[in-house]
Amino acid sequence: MKKKIQLTLNGKKTILEAPAHRLLLDLLRDEIGLTGTKEGCGTGDCGACTVFLNGKPVNSCLILSGELDGAELVTIEGLKIGPELHPIQKAFIQDGGAQCGYCTPGMLMMAKALLDENPNPTEEEIRFALSGNLCRCTGYAKIIQAVQDAAKEIRQAARR
Amino acid sequence: MKRTEPLEIYQPTSVNEACRIIKQSGPGGHFLAGGTDLIIAIKEKGWVPRYVVDLKRIPSLSEILTNSDGSLVLGALTTMREIEISPLIRDRYPFLAQSAAEVGSIQIRHRATIGGNMANATPSADVAPALIALDAKAKISGENSERIVALEKFFVGPGKTLMKPDEILTALIIPPHPATLRGEYIKFSPREMMDLAYVGVAVALAMDERKKVKHVRIALGAVAPIPMRARKAEAIVLDQILSEEIAEQAGGEAAKECSPISDVRSSADYRREMVRVNTKRALLNAASEHWRPTSWVERRDRRY
């Protein structure tokens, strides 16, 4: 059964129809065409599918479209600020915080969630926040470095 | 990964309406809270619900309230993350906040609810021993009915509770406790994060001015078909000054009381031994003077 869903998706009001059982992940990728969000495990262990739902980072592989009416969603495509890459994205590029890149969208979203709450995290706090995001290339050291550098850049920009 | 089969989704706005939907629609339905267990069961265990009743549009279920008598009411849809970061819970019952922080990832904890976690009755649920150590009660609502049972009695087996199919767990109620109550939750698991417990031990205790233990609860997770109290171990500690020897004895007794199974995570013998060690640690940590968990690192280092 199709259900009418009203969303704010990356800042834009969107009305669409989707079957209630369609996973949010599939809704984004297959019906809306936003393929930045990835499916890793499909069971909430790997974090590759992380998106913001009503401001909170969640696993889009565990949410049904039928739950979404009225929701505010931000995906990796909505992380950029206008035409500019987000400082977190810039830091990942600068520090080589991606190898194959598959986990990267989830890592970026979770790093954003962390830095929104805590602009000056310790290394342990970064590890704690990213514990639900797996990188099978195991490039964690550079990912953590990138989050630290992004945090520094965001703090400096706030002072400017 | 497998996908959900087509299903109907209902979004009632009151508990009565939700119960009525389940009654009228009959078997093949599930209540849906955070979905972090249900969707995984659909994908991994081959569950095929005909319909789900999404409880998240019922406003009264997602509040944390303090009653005038000092009891604390956690609405069933309170998320694990909300419990983890609630200033009220961190101040009064830091070990409960910590037990919630042990569940899954931050992403999972933003969805997973305390009511869903209890209603699914997984023996290894981290929050269950902490709640049982706090003498928590489960508030169960049906259509125009309501009953309150001790959380310890709420569980009847792995995945089974005493609720009827058309009843909903609507809140967890923590009765008032003296300000001197202190506690500890130790999750002992193969990996530090993103794993289920081999063993979970929660302790809550209160001491008099001469350091004698006047109230104690020891609750164990993952080592019996349901989260359980170790009553014989409690009896060893009660009215004693909590020395290393007493804690050791209580740990030994708790290891005898539990009934763990062997599975992919560990053998039953190992689980028993870890109950002994971690019960002792949890008791001594809970009784220690000057420790309040602040960061994850501090909590982690405290385990070993």
Image: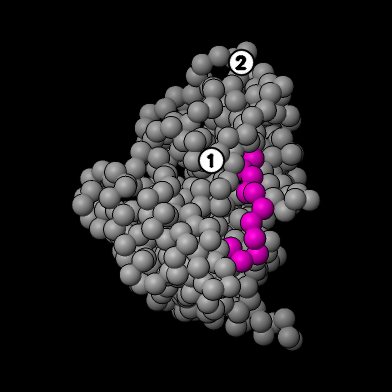
Around disc 2, counting alpha carbons within 10 Å, would you say few (fewer than 14), some (14 to 19), or many (20 or more)?
some
| Residue B241 visible within the image | yes
Q: For residue B192, which quarter of the picture?
A: bottom left
Q: Mark 1 lies on which chain?
A: B
Q: Where is residue A83 in the image (x, y as percent from the top left)?
A: 67, 66
Q: Can residue A9 be seen in this view?
A: no
A151 relative to B12 in the view: left or right? left
Residue B69 versus residue B10 in the image, above or below: below
Q: Is residue A29 left or right of residue B59?
A: left
Q: Which mark identifies residue B151?
A: 1
**Which labelled disc corresponds to residue B273?**
none
Given residues B281 and B44, the one toward you in this image is B281
Query: Which image quadrant: the N terminus of chain B?
Result: top left
Q: Given the current orientation, which residue lies at the most extreme right position? A: B68
Is residue B172 a member of the stretch shown in magenta?
Answer: yes
Rendered position, B264 above or below A88:
above
Q: Name the element at disc 2.
A: helix
Instruction: Answer with the quarter of the image where residue A103 lies.
Output: bottom left
For badge 1, the amino acid type reads Leu
Residue at 31% across / 62% down in the picture?
Answer: B249
Quadrant for the C terminus of chain B in the image: bottom left
Q: Which residue is drawn at 37% across and 32% down?
A: B45
Residue position for label 2: B23
Please state which of residues A52 and B38 is positioned toward the viewer in this rendering: B38
Q: Give the range drawn in magenta.
A: B171-181
Residue type marked 2:
Lys
Seen at 53% across and 77% down, the residue is B289
Give how far across and how far down residue A148 sits, in percent: 53, 79
